[in-house]
Image (cartoon, rainbow, N blue to C red):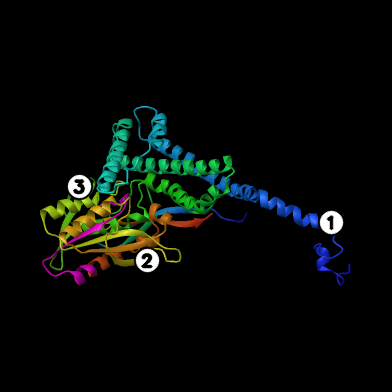
């Protein structure tokens, strides 16, 4: 009666190989581990982790 | 009311002044339970089992609908519903094991024929499908057909017990149902992760090895399996994993066969996810000996056979997790262990090899969402 539903939210962690800035954002379709993109510092940023976190609704 | 003169013998009809009505109240249930006890137990138990079967039926239908909507989303050549339904009913007959000699080769052949057929079947349904989508559809098809099989077997056992009023037949079902439902829950929960191409808990091995491969040149070594060569502290390091980010486990045993034909391997280190026991913490790391690889056993047999023939020691590093964690979106705790696992591999290499030796590190598991 009072049980809450658990929802898993997928997150992607992107780390810049230059400035080491770490950004945690919601997963978007097409994200795969170690895919590279451009960081605002000009160096390469890489997806280091993709994981799910449970939230109660 | 006065309870001080309550007589227990009189109440149960055991005294001299026996009440025939009280005697009947005692005797009738005993007679009923002697003759109809099993049937009553069958009715009580069947209520619980019916709930479980309804859940399995819902999972089967939902997984089928998910699969159909996913296939429809990638432009099939015709309406895929009929073909998918036909495929969900396909079965695999395991080889005769009365004479077990050579049975592993037969099982491998049967399983690989089924996998090849599934791939061809999907490709004919969606002619322009990419390898990434092919892997996803193949995995979703396996999940849907497994859920269909679970539902069919449980329902068959239940209906047979009910038809024959056979209580002992329903007992194993009652005992197994919680485990069956746990596996079915996990499979149902796995669908969104595989549809989205996200890494699952089982992908921790490929994740660690894929990370180590990043700066190296990759080559295909066996079907859906890649290899990279690098150096670590004066040792030759050969890294093997399934080719990501497709949803596949590759063929690491075939890769080992190819490699050992070419060069000498001094140590094999296998990294895999492993089912934790109840009471054990999730995402903990453990070391051990022997080939850490799941599945039906054919890959493990092949690896053990080569390792024994070539006298190569096999070490394993496992990350413990539940069945649900292994096939659903990777949890943060498991993902956070990747760096630690890499350090453990390096420690293991330093402890068990000398400079100039060759080490093979295999990342075992489904590599969905994990590139290299």
Residue B100 image position (x, y, % from top left): 29, 49
- Position of residue B30 in the picture relative to residue B301 (left or right): right
Q: Are marks 3 and 2 in contact (CB under 8 Å)?
A: no
- For image coordinates 40% across by 38% down, the residue present is B70
The span from disc 2 to disc 1 (Cα, nearest Å) is 67 Å
Q: Are marks 2 and 1 in contact (CB under 8 Å)?
A: no
Residue at numbered disc 2: B284
The vertical placement of B85 against B53, above or below, is above
Label at residue B222: 3
Nearest to viewer (mark 2 / mark 1): 1
Q: Circle 1 marks a residue in which chain?
A: B
From the viewer's side, name the closer residue of B245 and B144. Answer: B144
Residue A18 in view, yes or no: yes
Q: Of the two numbered discs 3 and 1 on the same chain, state the one appearing first in sequence.
A: 1
Q: Circle 2 marks a residue in which chain?
A: B
- For image coordinates 44% across by 53% down, the residue present is A9
Residue at numbered disc 1: B20
Residue B325 image position (x, y, % from top left): 41, 56
Q: Of the two numbered discs 3 and 2 on the same chain, state the one appearing first in sequence.
A: 3
| Quadrant housing residue B27 | bottom right
Question: In the rendered structure, which segment of residues is drawn in magenta?
Answer: B348-372
């Amino acid at each position: 009666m009072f049980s809450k539903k658990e929802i898993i939210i997928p997150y992607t962690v992107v780390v810049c190989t230059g400035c080491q800035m770490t950004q945690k954002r919601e997963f978007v379709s097409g994200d795969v581990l170690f895919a590279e993109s451009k960081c605002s510092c000009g160096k390469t940023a890489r997806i280091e982790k993709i994981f799910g976190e449970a939230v109660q609704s | 009311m006065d309870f001080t003169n309550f007589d227990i013998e009189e109440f149960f009809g055991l005294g001299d002044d026996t009440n025939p009505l009280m005697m009947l109240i005692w005797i009738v249930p005993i007679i009923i339970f002697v003759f109809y006890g099993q049937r009553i137990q069958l009715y009580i138990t069947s209520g619980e089992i019916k709930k479980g079967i309804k859940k399995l039926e819902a999972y089967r239908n939902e997984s089928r609908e998910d699969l159909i909507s996913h296939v429809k989303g990638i432009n099939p050549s015709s309406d895929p519903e009929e073909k998918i339904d036909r495929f969900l009913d396909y079965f695999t007959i395991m080889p005769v094991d009365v004479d077990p000699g050579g049975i592993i080769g037969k099982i491998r052949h049967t399983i690989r024929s089924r996998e090849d057929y599934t791939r061809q079947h999907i490709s004919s349904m969606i002619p322009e499908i990419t390898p990434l989508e092919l892997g996803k559809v193949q995995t979703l098809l396996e999940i849907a057909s497994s859920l269909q099989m679970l539902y069919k077997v449980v329902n068959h056992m239940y209906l047979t017990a009910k038809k024959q009023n056979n209580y002992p037949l329903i007992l194993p079902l009652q005992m197994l149902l919680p485990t069956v439902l746990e596996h079915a829950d996990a499979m149902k929960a796995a669908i969104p992760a595989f549809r989205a191409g996200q890494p699952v808990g089982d992908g921790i091995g490929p994740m660690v090895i894929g990370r180590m491969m990043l700066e190296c040149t990759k080559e295909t070594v066996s079907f859906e399996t890649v290899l990279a060569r690098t150096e670590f502290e004066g040792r030759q390091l050969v890294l093997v994993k399934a080719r990501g980010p497709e949803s596949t486990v590759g063929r690491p045993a075939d890769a080992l066969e190819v490699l050992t034909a070419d060069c000498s391997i001094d140590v094999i280190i296998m990294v895999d996810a492993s089912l934790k026991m109840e009471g054990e913490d999730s995402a903990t790391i453990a070391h051990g000996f022997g080939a850490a690889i799941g599945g039906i056993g054919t890959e493990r047999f092949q690896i053990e056979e080569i390792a024994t023939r070539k006298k190569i020691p096999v070490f394993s590093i496992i990350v413990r997790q539940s069945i649900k964690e292994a096939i659903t979106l990777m949890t943060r705790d498991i993902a956070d262990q990747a760096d630690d696992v890499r350090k453990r591999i390096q420690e293991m290499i330093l402890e068990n090899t000398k400079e100039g030796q060759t080490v093979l590190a295999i990342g075992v598991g489904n590599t969905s969402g994990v590139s290299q």
